[in-house]
Amino acid sequence: MSNLRWKLLLIVAVTVVFGAVGVYPIVAARYGISGPKLLTDRVLKLGLDLKGGVNLVLRVQTDDALRIESETEMERLRELLANARITPSNMALAGTDAFKVEGISGDQDAAFRAAANEVSANFERDSGTNGTYTFRLKPNVALQLREEAVVQARQTIERRVNELGVAEPIIAQQGTNGDQILVQLPGVTDVNRAKEIIRSTGLLELKIVEQGPSASKEALAPGGNAPTGMEIVPGIGSGADAGSTMYYMVRRAAAVTGRDLRSARPSLDENGRPAVAFTLNSEGASKFGKVTGENIGRSLAIILDGKVQSAPRIDSRITNEGRISGSFTQEEVTNLSLILRSGSLPATLTYLQEQTIGPSLGADSIRSGVLASIIGLVLIIIFMVVYYKMAGVNATVALLLNLIILLGIMAYMGAVMTLPGIAGFVLTMGIGVDSNVLIFERIKEELEAGKGVRASMNAGFSRVFLTLMDTHLAALISAAFLFQFGTGPIRGFAITLVAGLASNLFTATFVSKTLFELELSRRAQATTLSI
């Protein structure tokens, strides 16, 4: 009797705990109950198909990654040649994955080849006529750069979406070439802001201003063509030129980039206007300190995505901190801080598909799913009670507790409920019924063989236990494969199934048997069993 009492207390404790975690937050949200916060924060999250939100498919322009690599190595080679006192007549990109060097004289050929060896690791070098050389990315390097660009873009998008505070977003690579990214944002209402944050390249560069600002490119260089190693960048004027487009001549090679950032946060400038304060890592601080220390009195262009945001004067050596100011609103500063913290994208993104799912569609899906689950549950209860009599009531109690535990597990894990997840609930009910049917039929066989009620009950549970373990393990393996290779909704189904298998094994064996023992304990001599 003491053993039975502890079993009952355990069942009650499990029901209270999982009911508080899984069921109470749903009831509280439905009827507007505010607390306790510890429980209401655990409310089961709804997926895109139930809550509504945004479904985006983006393509990573991997050619950008190849062009950046080619341009970076070309500028590196330009500096090496300048140090070796070699002046080619022209250096320019020859497509996205190559660049060309022209005008290398014969007496400079040996020195050129020695300098070019520094950039030959990732490039194939072909020589042409009249001192012309073409450097082209090796095919395996180009393929690796494309793959890395997609992975880095996905990781950057994940960080940005997490900063947005979206609950359980789905971000995954897809497409024949693997260059597409699926982004699902449940519950997002400000679609334009989400798209802008996801798509913004977020490339920060700090460069010393060589000339400018000027109202035109021609005023900085004849024909608007910058000298070798320089570039002309547009920006927004300040003071008397506020609101107009101004141009700055800066070096192509950046002193510090967004890769050197440690953090970025909203702030205010000296005039109390919204700005972004940033902190550099140790390597970036070292480079920034060197550049600012050597250029006191000159202007530093703060360039974001190819546009000068501000060009403050360097009054002293600066090491690990800086500020981006301009004509920002508070929302723009918040968004820019988020983008900079998450890192720059390695390539531009284009939208292939945009689908907005309204909350009303999600509400309809919830109603349909819940209605289907209730109808299925009622039919199961009717069948079990009619066919197995009081033992059917026993199975019904175990099944209801199974669903309570399942809700609690999913809420505690922070899982997301989707339409496939609701299908997992219905399947869990089927598995629960199947488990009880196996046990009950075995008990009936033992009774027909002439064994006593208690012996038949014990034999039914003990002999079917291994069968249940075998079927649950097989289903668990299937769920593991679904989770490993499936996308978001399929993973949701797999999570629901795994949680349902765990809770069902507890209720079908431990809870159901305890209820039988409770009934038999009330009778000193049990000769019959309502089954």
Image (spheres, rainbow, N blue to C red):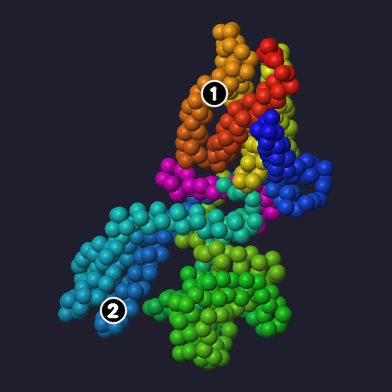
Near-viewer residue (388 or 208) = 388
Which mark is first along the chain, 2 or 1?
A: 2
Near-viewer residue (345 or 505) = 505
Q: Residue at the spot x=78%, y=41% of the render?
A: 27
Position of 176 with respect to 47 (left or right) is left
The local crowd at label 1, few if under 14, some if 14 to 19, many if 20 or more residues have their Cα within 10 Å, is some
Is residue 521 inside the magenta stretch?
A: no
Position of 76 with respect to 384 (left or right) is left
Q: Secondary structure at mark 1?
A: helix
Q: Is residue 214 visible?
A: no
Q: Residue at the spot x=73%, y=49% of the render?
A: 39
Measured as percent of width and height from the top left, residue 208 is found at 49, 82
Measured as percent of width and height from the top left, residue 442 is found at 56, 15
The local crowd at label 2, few if under 14, some if 14 to 19, many if 20 or more residues have their Cα within 10 Å, is some
What span is colored magenta in the figure?
Answer: 171-193
Circle 1 residue: 462
Is residue 189 inside the magenta stretch?
A: yes
For badge 2, the amino acid type reads: Leu
What is the quadrant of residue 95 in the picture?
Answer: bottom left
Measured as percent of width and height from the top left, residue 62 is found at 43, 55
Total number of numbered discs in the rendering: 2
Near-viewer residue (30 or 288) = 30
For badge 1, the amino acid type reads: Ser
Circle 2 residue: 81
Q: Is residue 468 above or below residue 530?
A: below
